[in-house]
Amino acid sequence: MTTPNPRVPNPFLGASSLSRRQLIKRAGVLGAAGLSLPAFLAACGGSSDDDASSGTSATGSSPGTAAASGSSPGGGGGDSLYFENWPAYIDPTEDGLTGTVDRFVAATGIDMKYTEAYNDNNEYFAKIQPVLGNGDTIDPDIIAPTSWLTGRLIQLGWLDKLPLDLIPNAANLRPDLVKPTWDPTGEYSLPWQTGFGGIAYNLDVTGRELTSADDLFDPEFKGKIGMLLEMRDTMGIIMLSLGIDISTLTDFATAEPAFAKLEQAKNDGQIRRFTGNDYMNDLSTGNFAACVGWSGDVVQLARDNPAVKFIIPEQGGTAWADAMVLPKGAVNRDAAAKWMDFVYDPVQAAQITAWVQYISPVAGVQEEVAKLDPDLAENPLLFPDEETIARTHIFANLSEEVEAEYDAAFSAITGA
Amino acid sequence: MTATIETEPGTPRARSSGTGRTSWWQRHPQRIGLGSLILSGVLLIAVGTGLLDGPLAIAALFVVLVAIVALIMVAVMGGLETRRALAPYGLLNPGMLWLALFYLAPLFTLLRNSLSTLPSRFAIDAKFDWNFGNYADAFTDFQDQFIRAFLYAGIATVLTIAIGYPLAYVIAFRGGKYRNFLIGLVIIPFFTSYLIRTIAWQSMLADQGAVTSFLRTIHVTGFLDTIGIMDGDKLLNTPAAVIGGLTYNFLPFMILPIYVSLEKIDVHLVEAAKDLYSTSVSAFRKIVFPLSLPGVFAGTLLTFIPASGDFVNQLYLGNPNTTMIGNSIQDQFLVQNNVPLASAMSFVLMAIITVFVLIYSRFFGTDDLV
């Protein structure tokens, strides 16, 4: 047979007339491109710090969380840092002010990744439980769970001890937060911020000032009330309005009337939605007339929408703390220590407080904030006076069995 | 295997062996094929569910490889007749093995989980102990969610038929040269993700959003409140919003099968009917509609089954009183980490849907799906 000429169509090949030589050549080119593509993508990828919150809270994965990874891409430990935090919990770089993350990067040269995908404690715990329970590591080096979850993680042994010798500024911790009940040795956590849970409302929608938790059950606001999925804040406020002391709870029977009241309200259609940290949008757009919320969030919202207000109910509100912890196996321990040292400097802490408007865990912040904004230094929500402290209560530590009863009752009303 | 026809030994089948003698594997190639398929499938399921692990799993995978290679060798070494007999098994192999490893193995794992108990609240692995209590809990604790899921999915399916059938009819019979373009328009919303489409409805139906403000301006909110579509003056976070979201998201799944079955109807049949003094309506009722039923049947399955397990629409458009079974299963799996209960709920949902579909197909009595 003569050598096939690629330009003469082969009658047996039909219209395509692709010869074997051409096919192998094209396949080779495609294969080479395919093999080199990952290399190009990796080179172009580089570092990216995105602080966009996921928003797809309950539907599954959000960027960069709970992936079983043996080693971080930074390599060697100390050159990069990954902090996964709650939304609206740090001052950003805007309006001519440099945010804390950028100031930290400029001061230390550490490549820091900060995301705001932590929407709810239970939801985040459920994400990390399969990974940490199997002994693998999660991506973030620092997370900031609320105190009760920190206590649970310590008991499960899923946290690394903080390198406190590398954090000299830890001495600035407020005396009332040293060695708290959820971290008796004080070696596993350093509080990020503390705050109050109370009632947030939109004055334009309610038409009047609210004063007590009973306003949440006012039929006038039927279908426009939001409640948090955070059991201790929602049930805490309801229990306080029924006269139950939440700081001395030991069993489920004491709390039953509060659960019954919440269930009744839900069945009546009083509650529009149970939310994580995503109540802020509904509150400012007016979908919620009032909701259970956290103090600093609302003060931040009020900057853009003065109709949004926050009160601690007259029967009492809840006090809580979020704590920075190192999940077990976190790679960038030194960088994490530098970060904690940085934010525990009263000057830096004051800048964070001035924006997030939560209560700083660092002593000596009030004087620094007075230099930035004298009015803020007198705000009782940021620097609580005796009267405010008397009206807020910390939820009691529950044993594992009792906590399971509370969670089961709460999720029967909210999640399922 | 009992249905295959086997020729007697001695017939000239093993052409390539050359000696005229036929060996066992050349006389019964079907047994080789079926045996290889079943053996590989069972071993893959065992490896996938974790019954075999470590060195046993490696040995099992080796046996699977040997079985596949043996099948190929028998096909190569046998003659044309052998290859013809083995062709169905060879073609089935990739699909069946894929299904075995990635569908049946997880299904069996789920089944085993549903009969297990968690040793402690935050334990990772559940212990298998024939715990049928999970099924009892699934039935009793989540009745409301099951009923609501099937109710909303049913209403959404009926609405998709009501909206989709006329649209498919117009495109099929009156579309002319714009048919493909119009069907393309139906599919274009699918280019965005399911989640984005649902969140878009959230901002569309917001209290101060376009739709609700318009309804308020034309003063129909009171009427809509009475018939239960709106709740006060809210359109978002109501059952109607959830059903609307379900209808919108599953509409193309209904339109496309109906369109396909309508398009295959010969227009001359309608003309013939008219020649026999039939009116247009009668022609539709007696000719077009019965011929399009397979498409409606397929569309109903494609809409009702996913809609009853859906949780996204309720999450963004619903309120705590409209939770569907999909939300409960997702909550148990991802927030409560109660895998045994969640697995039991999944199986109960599958069983109920299967019963519904069997009753439905018996009632419709359709032989072909398209």
Image (tube, helix red, strand yellow):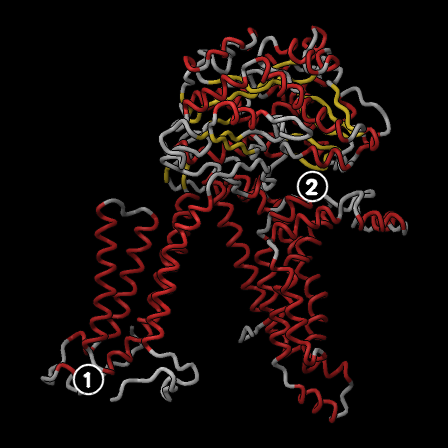
Count of marks, rendered view: 2
Q: Is residue B140 left or right of residue A31?
A: right
Pick the front one: B35 or A339: A339
**Element carrying mark 1:** loop
Query: Is residue A220 visible in the rendered structure shown here?
Result: no
Q: Is residue B369 above or below residue A196?
A: below
* Percent coordinates x, y for residue B345 in the rendering: 51, 46
Mark 1 touches mark 2? (CB < 8 Å)? no
- Disc assigned to residue A111: none
Q: Residues within 10 Å of mark 1 (few under 14, many from 20)?
A: some
Please say if A333 is above or below B222. above
Callout 2 crowding tier (Cα within 10 Å): few <14, some 14–19, many ≥20: many
- Tell me the residue that label 1 is attached to: B13
| Residue visible at 60% across and 53% down in the picture | B194
Type of amino acid under label 1? Arg
Q: What is the distance, in whole Å, between disc 1 and disc 2 at their CAs? A: 70 Å
Specify which label sits upstream in the sequence, 1 or 2.
1
Residue at image x 44%, y 84%?
A: A15
Residue B319: which numbered mark, if any?
2
